């Protein structure tokens, strides 16, 4: 390994992933100090942000209580649009989660070293996104405390029923709950060595106790690492097909029905690409904020952001290709209902949703062919938000426009959300951002041990002066 | 830092007394290195000297150290395969029991049980069982959770999760000798060499 040096001419393309000449101890310090900071040392802007987002969580709490008290009639779902905002939001949030698993598992299997600076926060984001997603199916049952009997095969005497395993909706329950469980486990396994670092640095009694408990007695023994690495590899191997299966199964909810616009075989790959696309955009939004608030420029470099933008470009193009294919097949199938549905999507009453989706998802990522834009932080911040708006519209377009004008013109309608619909969705953003802010402050946001592993390699690849520079 | 170490030791003693694991004995000779390459180099050499009960502590997985000091491959994978099969059979049995035995209900003239529609649930349960067993296995195979370990008595053990790479020669090793082993570790360039009793 020693002797192989990065070609100086390639430094612009492949700068070190850990910049600013950080050493092992600096990495520990930089990242642990965020967690260890006293209340008054954490910037005021953090507490203000937390106050705002947690107020929105109260809105969510109020909306859900209101729903339970009054029944799901307070949502706008009605004939002919029986699936509306709740499913749109569910698919939107589940999709967001996919980037976390892609970064932590798939990029791990592909040996993409740049994932180490962003995987922890992306995994956390996955968990919080799945939490938000889960709220919608749970509460659309109207009586969430009984939902366990409807969702899971629990032997019961009062209902005396089982689930119908031929229904894709029950597949979805299994897929999403497995996904949530595995994501939490994967995240926790990765956290343990870093929790041990925090334990070893802890000064207060309380911190020693909490981190001592959470780190389970991890001491970084070579035996520990051997089992850990084997296990981490297995978890990555399991998560990779899992993440592909989750959004495929979500798409089966639609694809196995006979509704024009839903009944297509393109749905599974198209949904997975869309999920990764939206998820990366959300990771981008969150990371740019955290990078700025917590001064992580040495770890989350422009190179990391650029790589993520490349993935956004690829997946965005796949999504665009899928839109075109759908349209072509609708025409080529000769099926008048299919043709009408797609014509109605683009030029019917929901034309504004369709063209918002097209602009945000197909046109906007194409800007990333330009290297300058791909590396411009303000531009990518705006674009990541645009992409998420577009991906929300995609789900809305698929769900609402396919349902609002079905086979019989006498039963056509137009869906409009109620204020409860809107505020519930806004509330889930509060929950998501609050959880993420708490995570970023109280747990190591960057995988300390993994970054050190990358650093150990880079010490051979780059000279000291090359490592000290900060590449813009 | 010294005060902190003293209070840490006192807390450890109190904890051990409470748990009734007081009897101290020599655990190992330990020495620290500053880079992973030095650790691997020293590991190879000390293995060459005939020591077999070896361990290392490092802030991140150091590649090559396990082979250098003779740590066997992890058997975790075999356990996970067993649980994966358990998940697969659980899912199939569940859906067969529900659909054919306990509550047979013909919907749309479809068969009561068929492998095609059971694929998604079977896949998810297989992954779920494997994932949970893998996570528990990582800790169980490492003997975790663990409240106390003698290596905590080493004066810079807290740096094993920071920036030191520690080589451990356990006292159970037949070749272990307080004087000789300490000297051997020092000759390999280890710093802060110490015989740890705990």
Image (cartoon, coloured by chain):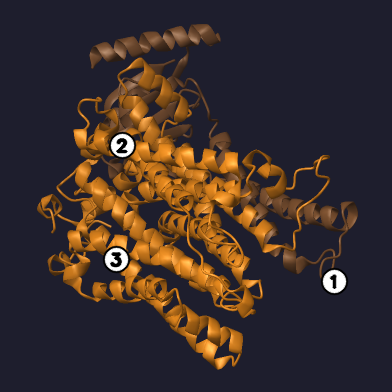
Viewed as shown, does residue A297 lie left or right of B146?
left
Q: Position of residue A366 (x, y in %)?
A: 28, 76
- Tag 3, which chain? A
Residue at 82% from the left image edge and 70% from the top image edge? B110
Q: Which mark is residue A50?
A: 2
Which quarter of the rendering shows the C terminus of chain A? bottom left
Is the residue marked by circle 1 packed among few (<14), some (14-19), or many (20+) residues within 10 Å? few
Viewed as shown, does residue A162 lie left or right of A180?
right
**Mark 2 and mark 3: Cα distance apart in space:** 28 Å
Q: Which residue is mark 1?
A: B109
Q: Nearer the viewer, residue A198 or A314?
A: A314
Q: Nearer the viewer, residue A133 or A295?
A: A133
The mark lying in front, picked from 2 and 3, is 2
For chain A, what colour was chosen? orange
Q: Hey, which quadrant is residue A37 in on the image?
A: top left
Q: Position of residue A84 (x, y in %)?
A: 54, 61
Residue at 20% from the left image edge and 59% from the top image edge? A302
For chain B, what colour was chosen? brown
**Mark 1 and mark 3: Cα distance apart in space:** 49 Å
Q: Position of residue A175 (x, y in %)?
A: 61, 56
Q: Hey, which quadrant is residue B181 in on the image?
A: top left
């Amino acid at each position: 390994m020693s002797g192989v040096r990065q070609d100086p001419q390639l430094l612009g393309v492949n700068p070190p992933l850990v910049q600013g000449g950080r050493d092992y101890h600096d990495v520990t310090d930089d990242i642990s100090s965020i967690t260890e900071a006293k209340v008054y040392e954490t910037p005021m802007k953090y507490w203000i942000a937390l106050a705002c987002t947690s107020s929105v969580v109260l809105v969510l709490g109020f909306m859900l209580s209101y729903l339970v008290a009054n029944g799901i009639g307070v949502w706008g779902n009605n004939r002919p649009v029986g699936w509306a905002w709740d499913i749109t939001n569910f698919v939107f949030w589940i999709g967001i989660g996919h980037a976390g698993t892609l970064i932590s598992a798939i990029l791990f299997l592909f040996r993409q070293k740049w994932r180490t600076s962003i995987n922890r926060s992306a995994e956390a984001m996955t968990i919080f996104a799945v939490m938000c997603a889960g709220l919608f199916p749970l509460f659309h049952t109207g009586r969430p405390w009984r939902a366990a009997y409807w969702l899971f095969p629990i032997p019961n005497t009062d209902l005396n029923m089982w689930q119908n395993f031929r229904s894709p909706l029950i597949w979805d329950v299994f897929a999403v709950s497995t996904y949530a469980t595995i994501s939490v486990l994967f995240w926790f396994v990765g956290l343990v060595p870093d929790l041990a670092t925090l334990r070893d640095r802890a000064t207060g009694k309380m911190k020693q106790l909490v981190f001592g408990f959470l780190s389970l007695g991890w001491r970084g023994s070579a035996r520990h690492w051997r089992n850990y690495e084997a296990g981490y590899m297995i978890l990555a191997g399991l998560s990779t097909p899992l993440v592909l299966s989750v959004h495929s199964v979500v798409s089966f909810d639609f694809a196995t029905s006979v509704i024009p616009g839903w009944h297509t075989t393109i749905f599974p790959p198209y949904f997975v690409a869309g999920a990764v696309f939206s998820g990366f955009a959300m990771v981008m939004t969150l990371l740019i904020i955290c990078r700025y608030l917590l001064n992580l420029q040495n770890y989350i470099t422009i190179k990391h952001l650029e790589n993520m933008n490349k993935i956004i470009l690829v997946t965005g193009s796949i999504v665009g290709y899928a839109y075109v294919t759908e349209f072509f097949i609708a025409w080529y199938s000769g099926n008048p209902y299919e043709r009408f549905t797609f014509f109605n999507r683009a030029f019917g009453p929901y034309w504004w949703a369709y063209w918002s989706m097209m602009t945000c998802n197909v046109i906007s990522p194409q800007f990333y062919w330009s290297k300058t834009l791909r590396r411009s932080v303000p531009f990518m911040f705006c674009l990541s938000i645009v992409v998420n708006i577009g991906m929300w519209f995609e789900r809305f377009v698929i769900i609402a426009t396919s349902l609002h004008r079905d086979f019989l013109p006498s039963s056509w309608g137009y869906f409009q959300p109620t204020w409860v619909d809107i505020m519930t969705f806004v509330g889930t953003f509060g929950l998501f951002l609050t959880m993420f802010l708490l995570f970023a402050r109280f747990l190591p946001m960057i995988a300390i041990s993994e970054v050190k592993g990358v650093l150990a390699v880079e010490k051979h690849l780059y000279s000291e002066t090359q490592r000290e520079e900060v590449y813009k | 830092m010294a005060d902190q170490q003293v209070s840490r030791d006192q807390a450890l003693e109190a904890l051990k007394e409470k748990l009734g694991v007081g009897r101290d004995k020599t655990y190992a000779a330990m020495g620290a290195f500053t880079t992973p390459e030095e650790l691997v180099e020293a590991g190879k050499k000390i293995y060459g000297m005939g020591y077999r009960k070896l361990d290392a502590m490092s802030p991140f997985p150091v590649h090559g150290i396990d082979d250098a000091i003779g740590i066997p491959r992890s058997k975790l994978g075999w356990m996970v395969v067993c649980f994966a099969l358990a998940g697969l059979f659980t899912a199939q049995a569940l859906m067969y029991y529900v659909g054919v035995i306990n509550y047979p209900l013909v919907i749309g003239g479809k068969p009561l049980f068929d492998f095609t529609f059971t694929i998604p649930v079977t896949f998810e349960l297989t992954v779920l069982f494997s994932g949970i067993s893998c996570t528990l296995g990582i800790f169980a195979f490492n003997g975790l959770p663990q409240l106390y370990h003698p290596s905590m008595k080493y004066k810079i053990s807290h740096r094993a999760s920071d920036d030191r790479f520690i080589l451990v020669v356990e006292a159970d090793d037949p070749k272990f000798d307080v004087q000789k082993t300490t000297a051997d570790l020092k000759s390999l360039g280890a710093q802060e060499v110490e015989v740890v009793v705990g």
